[in-house]
Amino acid sequence: MSAAREEILGRIRGALAGDPAGEVAVARGYRKTSDLSGAALADRFAERAEAYKATVRRVDAAGATEAIRRLQGRFVVPSDLAESWLPADFVRDDGNLSHRELDAVVGVVTGCAIAIAETGTIVLDAGAEQGRRAITLLPDFHVCIVPVERIVGSVPEAIGALRGSLPRPLTFMSGPSATSDIELNRVEGVHGPRRLEILIVGEA
Amino acid sequence: MASAAEPHTFPQLAKRAVADTQLRRNIGNATQTIRTKRAAVVAEVQDWEELREAGRSLKEHTLRNLDRYLVQLEEAVTKAGGQVHWARDGAEATRIVTEIANRHSVKEVIKVKSITTEEIKLNEALEAAGIRPFETDLAELIIQLGDDVSSHILVPAIHRNRAEIRELFMRKLGLAELSDRPSDLTAAARTYLREKFLTVPMAVSGANFGICDTGTICVVESEGNGRMCLTLPKVLVSVMGIEKLVPTWEDMEVFLQLLPRSSTGERMNPYNSLWTGVTPGDGPQEFHLVLLDNRRTDVLADRTGRQTLNCIRCSACLNVCPVYARTGGHAYHSEYQGPIGAILTPQLHGMDEAASLPFASTLCGACYEVCPVKINIPEVLVHLRTRAVARSGFNMEKLAMGAAIRMFDNPGLLETAQKIARVAQRPFVSDGYITGGLGPVRQWTRARDLPAIPGQSFRDWWRTRR
């Protein structure tokens, strides 16, 4: 295979051989931060997440506990999820559950790494209280806890904050899964979770 | 795809397409819908033009250092537990994927939507090797079940309506009952594919971005079928064109703003998956990245055509193109349609395959205006037209253009020609335009308005004034 490698690299060097010397400067005139802060951040995140047909609720810590306790049916949770966020009927995953078992539960409760206000996006980085990727993918109903201090304004702020998450896998979620493949009618709920409920916890 | 005997030049296929009023209505409505959505979400970004310039300059910078960046990506992916393969052309790439499948003795693979794997005809190669590929994107599934070809980069089944899809699903998925509501059709696809996601041990994907400093690969999608394929199987193979690189992790802050808004007209598409090699206990435990050339280095060698490699496959140019809106995608006879197809296909598949495509445009420039990475598509179209004409042998148009150059160079000759033309054009003039004519003139006027020579030229008028 290395023959192909050398040939392709050779072709590239040949193609670039006649280029003028000097580097192409990368234009960085775009905004890095948003002008939102505090309560406006949480408001904007809630509004943008709802635009994708996610259900959003603003609660304090006690309200979050109560809302999760009231969930009906069996939920899978990451092995390190806090006691106060456990549903009534739960099973902890530490990598032991098969895909079939994950497919059979009603839903999943997790935290998140970060959330982006401008786009209404939640980012999972397989870090604390999030578990492996399969647990937020196979169950049909995802309840995601977003502590208000995890909300950032812009995509560049999120990318900056996430470098430390690498090399763990990242998933950006904006609402439940969706398709517009049939006559461009948006249908929510295809292969990924069909319902996404977001609990924004804390006072902004 | 049509066989060589069937018509496959753009004029032939377009003529057939524009006669199909249902298709024109479908495509016209669809492109207008996406256009409107895109315009709304782009308008709310104050620094859109700065982002476009960042996207363009990042791509140019990366291409100008492509050898260095590919080696850096290879190193980072390998360090993270992935295996990197290099493929000079489509045949080599499909051989690599087939060998990996054979090594694991798999008879089925699940696929994420990937135009790159269409470009190299991967499904055909797998089937020839006795391996069954399952497309998992809803539109790709519709195309695959219908033995059809894609007509749009983003929404491949844009030419199919709900009634056709219902009929297809009932027949191919063996369903006795099914409504034509998009939600029910989607649910049928979900049920059919869920079992595949849970049982098929190998997935094949394309890649939207390869991040060189971290070795991270990014796939952008909506349905979650991508996440399923990238998470559940034991083995994952991603086929990526060598132009899909971004230098650093931070550069994703530009492309994750440009792509979703330009593509689906959303602030962010539902799902982005980013992974770095192999993560123990999470996702595929064997990851292969296939770096594909397949003439991309030829495109890189052409300094005007090179910007084509900036493309991030958003499809905004298709949705604003007045030609695409009327002909639809099949007229382009390629997995890449619309304005980007008109410049990418001749460069990737060769001029012999697609000599008519650079002419499939009015050069109105709408595509350049919406392109998130500022590919000057009209400039590349004209550049490729020059190449097409230079390659073509003797023809009347070339001869006529040569004569025109001499005529416009010589005032006396021009006046004589005008006098002759004024008489000769009479039988063909209606409403101030020449509609018809003889031989080459007729060919010219079939697709263009040729203003008639006026009764008095400016020179004549000037002489009467003095």
Image (cartoon, grey):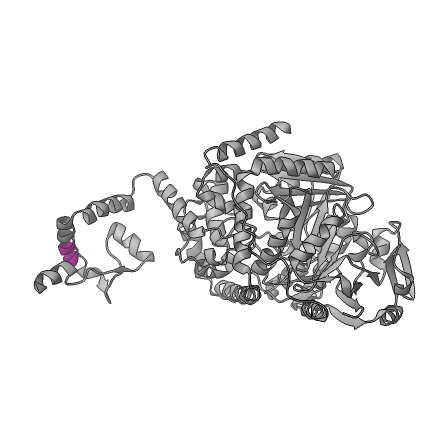
Which x, y percent locates residue B91? 59, 35
Q: Residue at x 81, y 43 (%)?
A: B280
Q: Quadrant of residue A116?
A: bottom right
| Closer-to-camera residue (B433/A108) | A108
Of the 4 image quadrants, the one containing the C terminus of chain A is bottom right
Which x, y percent locates residue B4? 47, 43
Judge left or right: residue A122 versus residue A90. Answer: left
Visible residue check, residue B146:
no
Q: Is B292 placed above or below A165 here?
A: above
| Closer-to-camera residue (B368/A74) | B368
| Closer-to-camera residue (A202/B196) | A202
- Residue B419 inside the magenta-drawn segment: yes
Which x, y percent locates residue B292? 59, 38
Which x, y percent locates residue B271? 69, 57
Q: Main secondary structure of the magenta part?
A: helix
Q: Residue at x 53, y 57 (%)?
A: B50
Question: How many discs mark residues in the rendered view?
Answer: 0
Q: Is A104 placed above or below B405 here?
A: below
Judge left or right: residue A171 versus residue B53. Answer: right
Visible residue check, residue B436:
yes
Of the 4 image quadrants, the one containing the N terminus of chain A is top right
Q: Residue at x 90, y 65 (%)?
A: A84
Residue at the far top in the pictured view: A3
The boundaries of the magenta stretch are: B418-424
- Residue A132 inside the magenta-drawn segment: no
